[in-house]
Amino acid sequence: MISHSCLAKIPTIYAAAGSPAAGKTTFVAYALKQKILPGSAFVHDCDWVMTQLEGYQADLQLFGAEAAFKKWELPARALAEVELQKAITEGRDVIYDRSCALASSYSFLKKVIQNNGYQLVMHVVYLDKDKTFSRAKERESKTGRHIPESMILERLEMISALWLHYLSISQEAFLYVNRADGFVLISKYQGKKLSIENPEIYEEFLSYGKMKEINLG
């Protein structure tokens, strides 16, 4: 089991972050089973919401995965965010299953910390570009969920570029590599101290974001 400190009874957003198809949802299932994440938390997962929509399923059968994704991604996100806001207003713990790979995601999480009294715990899942592309194609063949490779690469670069910024607002943060034998810890941030378990993979992860320009306002 991956160890982490026992946090105070403060409402917490547990962000399961990483590029699309990196294995975030698989990590959430694993972490819930291992009690790394609390089973009582509200789970925010836009992809799951999209797959539950009748319109998405109908378009998936009629027009294919790519067309259905383009049409229903944003409506599903809007529906999921309404439920997320309800959970935050109620002060519930939240498992935030999103890439967190946009400046707007960083700003949103920072505002929740500042305005709603939450603390942030990051769990970032890393998989290199080629393996992520392969995983996305395999998943599409099984489930019909289409994700453009351009989006995957963009989000991989952005989560890499945002990693150190997230450390500045996180109570704790963990970075894992997704391997065939499970999720292996690369680095952890606890007690305002960053420790690196695997320097080679850590630098590989950071290399994706080195040339990325971001504007956090």
Image (spheres, helix red, strand yellow):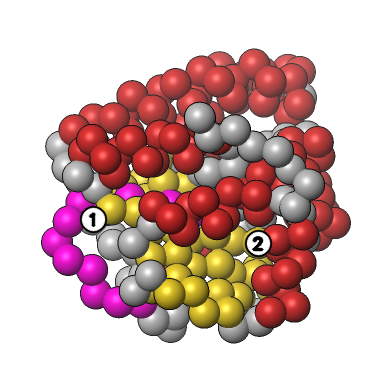
Q: Could you tell me which residue is drawn at 57 percent across and 55 percent down? A: 163
**Real-space CA distance between mark 2 and mark 1, rounded to the nearest whole angstrom:** 26 Å
Q: Quadrant of residue 86?
A: top left
Amino acid marked by disc 2: Tyr
Dot label at residue 126? 2
Q: Does the magenta run of residues contain 11?
A: yes
Q: Nearer the viewer, residue 13 or 157?
A: 157
Dot label at residue 156? none
Q: Nearer the viewer, residue 36 or 153?
A: 153
Q: Does the magenta run of residues contain 86?
A: no
Q: Going by the image, does 123 lie left or right of 12?
A: right
**Between discs 2 and 1, the one toward the N terminus:** 1
For label 1, the residue is: 40
Question: Would you call the spot at circle 2 few (<14 residues within 10 Å), some (14-19), or many (20 or more)?
Answer: many
Q: Which residues are magenta?
A: 4-17
Question: Would you call the spot at circle 1 few (<14 residues within 10 Å), some (14-19), or many (20 or more)?
Answer: few
Q: Looking at the image, can residue 148 be seen? A: yes
Q: Could you tell me which residue is drawn at 66 percent across and 81 percent down? A: 198
Classify the position of the N terminus by image quarter: bottom left
Q: Going by the image, does 100 lie left or right of 147?
A: left
Q: Are marks 2 and 1 in contact (CB under 8 Å)?
A: no
Q: Going by the image, does 138 lie left or right of 54?
A: right
Label 1: element kind: loop
Label 2: element kind: strand
Q: Looking at the image, can residue 26 be seen? A: no
Amino acid marked by disc 1: Ser
User: x, y (%) of residue 179?
Assistant: 69, 73
Of badges 2 and 1, the one in the foreground is 2
Please say if 72 is above or below 48: above
User: x, y (%) of residue 84?
Assistant: 32, 33
